[in-house]
Image (spheres, rainbow, N blue to C red):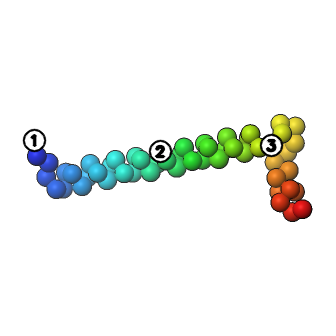
Amino acid sequence: MQLSNELFAILFSIVMVVAVVWFMRSLSRYKLWIKSRGEPSHQPSAAPYQEKQE
């Protein structure tokens, strides 16, 4: 079975869009996970900003 160039381009574009969306969602979840690990649970989120100022 052969795919036409147009059909291949459409399928490839769909796969690339899905991959980029998945990557961006994973990256944002990873950033939230790192942020939650780095902060003590009893302090507000301003703690890392204060550490950067010093």
**Mark identifier at residue 1:** 1
The outermost residue toward the bottom is 53
Tell which circle, 1 or 2, labels the residue nearer the N-terminal end.
Answer: 1
Answer left or right for 45 relative to 14. Answer: right
Residue 48 on image: x %, y %: 82, 52
Badge 1 density bin: few <14, some 14–19, many ≥20, Cα 10 Å: few
Residue 27 on image: x %, y %: 57, 47
Q: Secondary structure at mark 1?
A: loop
Do the numbered discs 3 and 1 sit on residues whose CB atoms are within 8 Å?
A: no
Residue 30 on image: x %, y %: 61, 43
The outermost residue toward the right is 54
Residue kind at label 2, given as amino acid type: Trp
Which quarter of the rendered picture does the N terminus lie within?
top left
Which quarter of the rendered picture does the C terminus lie within?
bottom right
Compute the Cα span from label 1 to label 2: 29 Å
Q: Residue at horizontal 10%, vertical 46%?
A: 2
Q: Residue at horizontal 19%, vertical 51%?
A: 7
Label 3: which residue? 39
Answer left or right for 30 relative to 1. Answer: right
Compute the Cα span from label 3 to label 1: 55 Å
Q: Residue at horizontal 39%, vertical 51%?
A: 17
Compute the Cα span from label 2 to label 3: 26 Å
The outermost residue toward the left is 1
**Mark identifier at residue 22:** 2
Residue kind at label 3, given as amino acid type: Glu
Depth check, mark 2 against mark 3: the one in front is 3
